[in-house]
Image (spheres, rainbow, N blue to C red):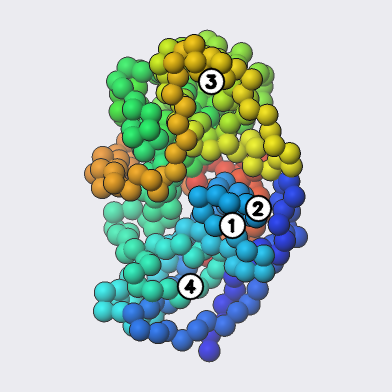
Amino acid sequence: MTTTREIHLASRPHGTPVPENFRTVETTLPALESDQVLVRNTVLSVDPYMRGRMNDVKSYVPPFQVDAPLDGGCVGVVEESTSESVAVGTHVMHGLGWREHAVLPASAVRPIDTSVAPASAYLGALGMPGMTAYAGLTAVAGLKEGETVFISGAAGAVGSIAGQIARKLGAGKVIGSAGSAEKVSWLTDELGFDAAFDYKAGPVAKQLAEHAPIDVYFDNVGGEHLEAAIFHMADFGRLALCGAISAYNATEVPPGPRNLMMAISKRLTLRGFIVSDHSDITSEFYKTVGPWIASGEIVTRETFVDGLDQTVEAFLGLGTGANLGKMLVRL
């Protein structure tokens, strides 16, 4: 019988996660049953939303269980199959990451075309982050040509794609915030953002003022960024609330924006969204954004760490800004 390794949640983090909250476990792979596949994972995704699943709270996805393996998006190669629909050697995407191998029903894997893009792209620009960016700008915010767009967390996997999609969809001006001068330069020099600023260099509201009024705000950060955006929104502006990474490690409930009254006076629309709610536009996303990525009109960046033993380090690096673009673990 074949053994493999997987990463378990050893304990629930209090505040910022630490390596001791995780444990690498050796386990035995079960024999395949009918219509199953054994996948050797090649690239694992780590994403900010995973932090919320480490808490024992009700949310849109179940929490991770202590002393059980974590999971997440990944790609790999089918090494064994009892399925007529998925052959050995097929490159696939599935949801049992944080491990070296996975046994799944054939229906739980999606074949991917690595001749169109590298397998890792299906975890980033052609995967959940890219789809999140597209859905947030179109289905949620209803971006119109000529509008001014502000994107927080703009150097991350979602934000970096959202800014470029906004430009391709006809935005008049795209502004981003990021956490270092290097990231700011990347946004303006390589990704085509019209302007960007380092949120650590001064109050967000003050730095955003010169770019106001904002028509669409794509929020990955929450907190100070959300408050600043509300202050500088145009009348009838739309805010697509995708994430609130500034509060993911908070040990107390953070205060809400102090200026919510402005949402009334400005007639703003604040709408939270989850990408899985917009599966109806998946084919539209691939048809529209896929060619931009294939042609290089949309620039992608991946930050890799190597080996299952570095998965926890990669995940913790999301909280310290260690990534440009998508953070991935290469096995």
The mark that comes first in sequence, 3 or 2, is 2
- Residue type at the position of mark 1: Pro
C-alpha separation, residue under disc 3 versus residue under disc 2: 28 Å
Residue occupied by mark 2: 55
- Residue type at the position of mark 4: Ala
Does residue 288 sit above or below 102 in this rendering?
A: above
| Residue 53 visible to an observer of this rendering | yes
Residue occupied by mark 3: 229
The mark that comes first in sequence, 4 or 2, is 2
C-alpha separation, residue under disc 4 versus residue under disc 1: 20 Å
Residue 273 figure quarter = top left
Residue at image point 57% right, 33% down: 221
Q: Position of residue 297 (x, y in %)?
A: 32, 36
Tell which of 256 and 225 is nearer to you: 256
Residues packed near mark 4 inside 10 Å, few (<14), some (14 to 19) or many (20 plus): many
Residues packed near mark 2 inside 10 Å, few (<14), some (14 to 19) or many (20 plus): some
Question: From this viewpoint, which residue is outermost toward the bottom?
Answer: 1
- For the residues bearing labels 4 and 2, Cβ distance under 8 angstroms: no
C-alpha separation, residue under disc 4 versus residue under disc 2: 24 Å
Circle 4 SS class? strand
Circle 2 SS class? loop
Residue occupied by mark 1: 63
| Residue 308 visible to an observer of this rendering | no
C-alpha separation, residue under disc 1 versus residue under disc 3: 31 Å
Nearer mark to the viewer, of 4 and 2: 2
- Residue type at the position of mark 2: Asn
- Residue type at the position of mark 3: Ala
Residues packed near mark 3 inside 10 Å, few (<14), some (14 to 19) or many (20 plus): many
Residue occupied by mark 4: 102
Residues packed near mark 1 inside 10 Å, few (<14), some (14 to 19) or many (20 plus): some
